[in-house]
Amino acid sequence: QKEVEQNSGPLSVPEGAIASLNCTYSDRGSQSFFWYRQYSGKSPELIMSIYSNGDKEDGRFTAQLNKASQYVSLLIRDSQPSDSATYLCAVRPPPSNTGKLIFGQGTTLQVKP
Amino acid sequence: NAGVTQTPKFRILKIGQSMTLQCAQDMNHNYMYWYRQDPGMGLKLIYYSVGAGITDKGEVPNGYNVSRSTTEDFPLRLELAAPSQTSVYFCASSNLSGRQDGQPQHFGDGTRLSIL
């Protein structure tokens, strides 16, 4: 069974702090990893994608990938109340030619003013 | 830009009724997907399609059917609605041209379906 695991939270951080969201996956052959943000009652929207080991930064967001440990994380710097949402980790397992994604259950982030 | 359009946005069905959830995309994407999301849970893949005329089952296909007669449209059919099918349904599309495995999926706004 191919799995993607996330802590459901809620993760509560004060405004201005760094929020750290974590995700592990079971299929070692996975090559593409995505973070989606989902506001309550809305559809998922893509925040970050990462394919290579290491860090990838985009504004206040940094995705980190460690394929050896089968671990991907999302850091949100200077957290804002508007960042309060559920963050879904998604992994593309092999074979990748179907484009299928396996989603974690999501981590709920609460940023308190 | 329309992107992925789902209709209807909300629907209430009685047990045993049937209905079709519509999904259309205008991005010329070859790949389309149907997910369901139960409260507090992630997305579970119901069916997917890699091109017109080609469909395949995902993790939770029982009770659903799909067709893909055109690149743009990917309707999801519920034949005999059951309370367990109460959920939010999302349609998504992607294009695996270029970097084959790196393209994300783009989601529609969802259909909230209640079966009573």
Image: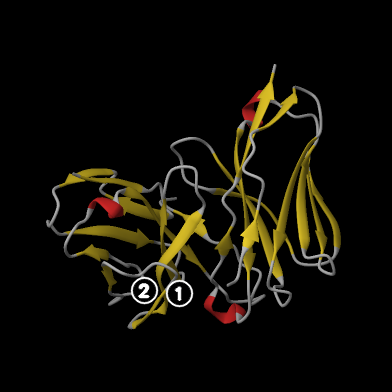
Q: Residue at x 77, y 51 (%)?
A: A73
What's the amino acid at mark 2?
Thr
Left-right relation of A87 to B83: right
Where residue B71 is drawn, which disc sits there?
2
Q: Residue at x 63, y 27 (%)?
A: A82
Q: Residue at x 71, y 54 (%)?
A: A23
Examine the image and state in which quarter residue B12 appears.
top left
Q: Residues within 10 Å of mark 1 (few under 14, many from 20)?
A: some
Left-right relation of B81 to B50: left
| Position of residue B58 measured from the top left corner of the image (x, y, whole percent) | 43, 72
Q: Nearer the viewer, residue A23 or A83?
A: A23
| Position of residue B16 measured from the top left corner of the image (x, y, whole percent) | 12, 57
What's the amino acid at mark 1?
Asn
Chain letter of disc 1? B
Residue A47 position (above or below residue B75): above
| Position of residue A55 measured from the top left corner of the image (x, y, whole percent) | 85, 55
Q: Nearer the viewer, residue A96 or B63?
A: B63
Q: Nearer the viewer, residue B37 or B27?
A: B37
Residue bearing mark 1: B30
Q: How many marks?
A: 2
Q: Residue furthest top?
A: A113
Q: Residues within 10 Å of mark 2 (few under 14, many from 20)?
A: many
Residue A10 position (above or below residue B88): above
Residue A83 position (above or below residue A33): above
- Nearest to N terminus: mark 2 or mark 1: 1
Left-right relation of B14 to A25: left
| Position of residue A15 measured from the top left corner of the image (x, y, whole percent) | 75, 22
SS assignment at label 1 = loop
Q: Given contact means CB atoms under 8 Å apart, are the residues at marks 2 and 1 in contact? A: yes
Chain letter of disc 2? B
Examine the image and state in which quarter residue A1 appears.
bottom right
SS assignment at label 2 = loop
